[in-house]
Image (cartoon, grey):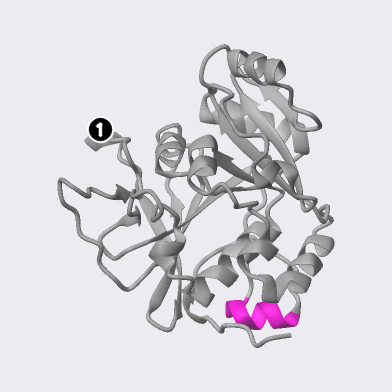
Amino acid sequence: MASLPRLETLFDRSSGTPIPLPRELREAYGGDLIFPAGERPHVYANFVSTLDGLVSYGIPGLASARFISRGHGGDRIVMGLLRAVADVVVSGSGTLRAEGKVTWTPQQIFPAAADLYRQVRRARGLPERTRVAILTASGDVDLSAAVFTSPDVEPFIVTSAAGAERLAANGTGTVRVRAVGDLAPTMRGAIDAIAAETGARLVLSESGPGLFGRMLDERVVDELFLTLAPHLAGRSPARPGIGLVDPVAFEHERAPWADLIGAKRSEDFLLLRYSFRR
């Protein structure tokens, strides 16, 4: 196995039950990965941003987050680990259109640790195939995308009643569809449907800034893992870019606040962990 990046843990105030990790992966991560246990699903999001808060350049051909992280090994191995421990990975149709080849599997983002990620999933009693839920209000998704055809993925779609009708008319093959509400599903409704469908307790959101903003607004997100890439992107009228929460804006008194519960370093990258206040 190729040598893995090593993260330096600056501090860790997380609490709960450690995830069983192989020794090599625990050493690479810089210690235990701990999540709280609870009755309802624990939803955690993962983003990488520039120092000035852009998560995407928002330009065709440069929209992917990999142009923000520039493929940094520390960010990628953690991204794979967060996928590996998740019962379900959630994303949206907009992210799917922007990154059509992504499957949201841990081995896709960091192939060198593929065997270690499989060990993590076996230790948690998870299926080897990654469960991926795609959220779409309209049902307008490309069912030939990699996430729906990969043998490493167990995909399903959460949509509205109208979206389910559209998908049924186009034919979904073996892809499961769950309708939640007549119009756009609420984020709470979507997460509850995902939990009912899979029994999920750890749910990773890799949705884009729009859905992430809606999750924050409905108080669905419990934690944020945020990698800060050590560069600046800037903004201009011609190239505004896309921020971490975009285009959602919060009223001052309802703005989400978070506690910093962890910080790690990988070369000049900072990997921060926040817990949102309820």
User: Quarter-wise, where is residue 209 in the image?
Assistant: top left
Query: Residue at 32% of width from left, 35% of height from top?
Result: 248
In front here: 143 or 22? 143
Q: Is residue 89 above or below residue 50?
A: above
In front here: 119 or 221? 119
> Outermost residue toward the bottom?
3
> Which residue carries the number 1 mark?
251
Image quadrant where one finds the N terminus: bottom right
Query: Residue at 40% of width from left, 73% of height from top?
Result: 270
User: Quarter-wise, where is residue 178 in the image?
Assistant: top right
Q: Could you say where residue 118 lies in the image, as x and y percent from the top left? A: 79, 66
> Which amino acid type is shown beneath numbered disc 1?
Glu
Q: Could you say where residue 87 lies in the image, as x and y percent from the top left? A: 72, 49
The residue stretch that appears in magenta: 23-31
147 to the left or right of 75 = right
Query: Residue at 61% of width from left, 46% of height from top?
Result: 42
Magenta span has 25?
yes
